[in-house]
Amino acid sequence: MVKLKIKKLNAEAKLPSYAHEGDAGLDLFSNEEDFILKPNYRKLIGTGISIELPPGFVSLIWDKSGVASNGIKTMGGVIEHTYRGEYKVILVNLSSKDYEIKKGQKIAQLLIQKIETAEIEETENLSDSVRGKKAFGSSGLN
């Protein structure tokens, strides 16, 4: 189990939490005053917290299904272990309706994952595979 050090940047901030035992994602909460996210607009939303991850781990911000079901999508969700500033979530409204976000509302999920650093090797050729260069739809539509 990895240990997260979390600092509240203000007293009203909510600490991330797991909704259920064994969940992969921690819920992140808005620390902004209530606002309306208009269709086709995006907003950077503060959570009021900063996190210290140990080396070898990364934070990934992902959609919260209940929020995403309303057409609200997260963007830009990789936070390196060296970052010590406020965790902020970029939300964009892809729907045709206004979406209200209230202070303290769950807005995204935070996944903590172990990272593997790749060794880069430039090459002239790649090995053949069953798929090869076949792209979108190459495995069939059904």
Image (cartoon, helix red, strand yellow):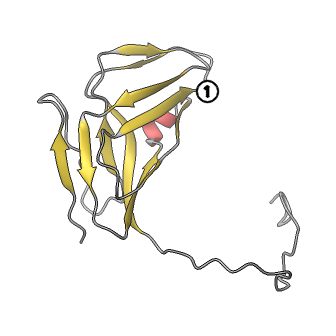
Residue at the spot 24% in from the left edge and 33% down from the top edge: 48
Residue carrying label 1 = 94
On the image, the x and y values in percent for residue 97 come to 57, 15
User: Looking at this view, is 91 or 54 the one in front?
Assistant: 54
Query: Is 127 located above or below residue 48 in the figure?
Result: below
* Horizontal and vertical percent position of residue 124: 85, 80
Q: Residue at x 29, y 48 (%)?
A: 84
Q: Position of residue 110 (x, y in %)?
A: 37, 50
Return the residue found at the far bottom. Answer: 127
**Which residue is at a point 29% across and 16% down the rendered structure image?**
33
Q: Amino acid at mark 1?
A: Leu
- Residue 75 placement, left or right of 85: right
Q: Secondary structure at mark 1?
A: loop
The N terminus, quarter of image: bottom left
| Quarter of the figure with residue 111 | bottom left
In the displayed structure, would residue 51 be above or below residue 123?
Answer: above
Against 4, residue 116 (above or below) is: below
